[in-house]
Amino acid sequence: MNLRTYISLIPFLLFSVVFNFNQVYAQWTGPKNKPKQFKEVQYGPLTPKNREDQAMIDFRNYGLGQFIHWGLYAIPGNEWKGVSARKGAAASEWIRSWGGETAPKDWKNTYDNLYKQFNPKNFDPERWAKQAKDMGAKYLIFTTKHHDGFALWPTAFSDYDITQTPYKKDIVKQVVNAYTDKGIDVFLYFSVLEWNNPDYMAKNPETTQEKERYNRFLQYTRNQLLELLDKYPKIKGFWFDGTWDDSWIKSYEFTYQLEKELREKHPGLIIGSRFRNDEHEKRHFDSNGNLLGDYEQGWERKLPQEYEWLDGNDWDAVMTIPPNGWGYMKDWEGLYIKTTDDLLDMMMHSVSMNGNFVLNFGPDGNGNMHPGEDKIAREISDWIKINGEAVHGVHHSELPVSKLGYYTQKDSVIYLTVFNRPVNNIARITVPKKSSTVPIKASILLNNQTLKINHADIGLDLDQNTYYDVTIPADFTSIRPFVIKISLGEPKKSADKLMDAKM
Ligand code: FHN
C-alpha cells in the first residue's frame, strides 16, 4: 500500500479511534459502573426510566424488529464497475467515503450525482411489509436519511431529496403506510451528521462564521424532524444516529430543547439514548448514570452478556447479517454470513434479557431484498410461525440461567428455547426452593407433545435450588432450536428439608 493510500485512510482511522474510545468502553462491555460522586445535571433525562405508557409497553412486547437501510448507496452495492469498495470504505452505506487506491477517480462527485439515476423499478413496500410480518417483526426502523444527507421523502428544507430523482414519489410515506397497515409499528431512522451539507461540521464551531453555519444546520435539523412528524403522524418514534461529533455534543442546550419539542408535538414519541448527551458530554447515560432517552440504543452488532448489565433498562440490539455493512452489498463472497440459527440465538438471547432484537436488511437499488437476506427471512418466519409465543409479549424469567438455552416468560408460562439438547434428553429446570410455583406441565411447541416432568429433589447440601426434569422423547427430532412450554403452578410437595452436612 503506497503513501498516498495511507494518507487517504487517515481521516477514517482517526474517526474510528475517537469513535471507538467513546463508544466501546462506555457501558457496553460490562455492568454499569455508576459514578460514585453525584453531579449536578441540568440537561439530563426528560423521561422516567421504564415509562409505563402504552407506547413503551408495546415497545417491550415487540421482541423482534426489522431494520432497513436503503438509499443511494444501494445503487453501487459496495462496488463500482466491478471494483469492490471493501478495502476503501468502512461499510457499504459509507461508500461515499471510499478512498485509497481502489477508489474510482472523482468518486465523491460520482456518488453525489447517483440521485439522478435512483429509480427503483421493483420497489414494493407491501411485499417488504408482508415479509416482515411473516418473519414476526413487530416494528420497523427505516432510514429516512443516512449520513449522505439524501432524504427519501419530499423535504421543504433541502434540494437533495427524492423529488430530484426519476422516481420522485415519497418513499417514506409508502413504507410507513404499508407497514402500519400490516400492524407493524414504524420508527424513523434519522442521521444528524451529513457529510455533504455545507453547513455541517464535525468539530465544535469556534468562529462567528462557523457558529452561524452550524446554527443554520441545527435549525435545518429541527425543521426536518418537525416536518417528518407532520407528514407521518403514525410513526412511534425516531432512531437517531450520527450524533457522536463534537459539534452536536456541544449543542446540549439545543438538543435538550429539541427533544422536549418533539415529545410535546408527538405525545408518546419514543426516542433512544443515542440522540443526545448532558452538559458534561455524557452520551447515552448522564453524569449520574441515568439513561438518556427511553431505551438503551448502543447495542449495535453486540449483545450484553449478563442480564444485570442492563440495570433494568429497556433496550434493543441492531444486527447485520454480514459481519458489518447495513446498506446493500452485492458481493458476500469471503464474508461470514450469520446463519438463521446464529440469528435465532441472538434473538432469544435478547428477548430473554428484556430486549428487542432488530435484524437489518439492505435492499438493492431496484428495491429487491438481497437473496441471502430473503432466505433468512423465510427461515425465521418458518420458525416464528411455530415458536412466536416464546418471542412476543414475553419478559425475562428470574429462573437461574439454563445451559440448554434461553428462558422467556409470560405470566405463569415459561418458555425454554433449547439450543443445546442434552445427550440424555433430560432438560433439567433449576428452580429456587423459595419459589411459590414450579413446573407442573410441559410440552413442545413444535408438535404440542406433552412431556413428562419429574421432581429431581437431589438434596445437595446448602443448595438453594431444587430441580425438575423434563424428558424430551428420544424420537423427537428438530433441525432447529425448539421450545419447551412449561406451565408453572403450586408444587405437589416442596423440596425435602434435609439435615445440613456437619463439616
Ligand atoms: O454509521 C452508522 C452505520 O452506517 C449504520 O447506520 C449503523 C446502524 O446502527 N449506525 C452507525 C454506526 O454506528
Image (spheres, rainbow, N blue to C red):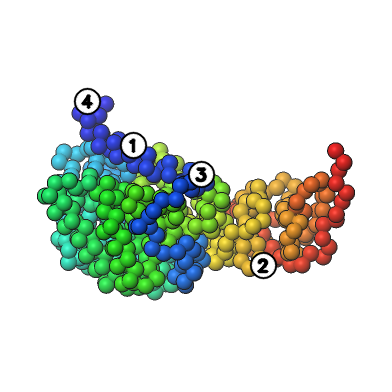
Q: Earlier in the sequence, mark 3 or mark 1?
A: 1
Question: On residue 17, which mark appears?
Answer: 1
For label 4, count other residues whose C-alpha is less than 10 Å away and answer few (under 14), some (14-19) or many (20+).
few
Q: Residue at x 40, y 38 (%)?
A: 334
Q: Horizontally, is 33 left or right of 8 in the view?
A: right
Q: Nearer the viewer, mark 1 or mark 2?
A: 1
Image quarter (top left, top right, bottom left or bottom right) of the C terminus: top right
The mark lying in front, picked from 3 and 1, is 3
Classed neighbour count for the residue bearing mark 2: other residues with Cα under 10 Å, few (<14), some (14–19), many (≥20): few
Kindly give the residue lying farthest to the top in the view shown: 2
Question: What residue is shown with label 4?
Answer: 3
Three-letter amino acid code at the position of disc 1: Val
23 to 150, vertically: above or below: above
Question: Does the Cβ of the disc 4 residue fall within 8 Å of ligand 1?
Answer: no
Query: What kind of residue is marked 3?
Result: Gly
Residue at 47%, 62% (x, y): give it: 49
Q: In terms of secondary structure, where does tag 2 sit?
A: loop
Give residue 455's quadrant in the image.
bottom right
The answer to which of marks 1 and 4 sits earlier in the sequence is: 4
Examine the rendered structure and indicate whether residue 389 appears above or below residue 9: below
Q: Secondary structure at mark 1?
A: helix
Q: Quadrant of the N terminus?
A: top left
Front of the two marks 2 and 3: 3
Residue at the location (31% across, 48% down)? 244
Q: Is residue 130 visible?
A: no
Residue at mark 3: 30
> Cβ–Cβ below 8 Å for labels 1 and 2?
no
30 is higher (above) or lower (below) than 117: above
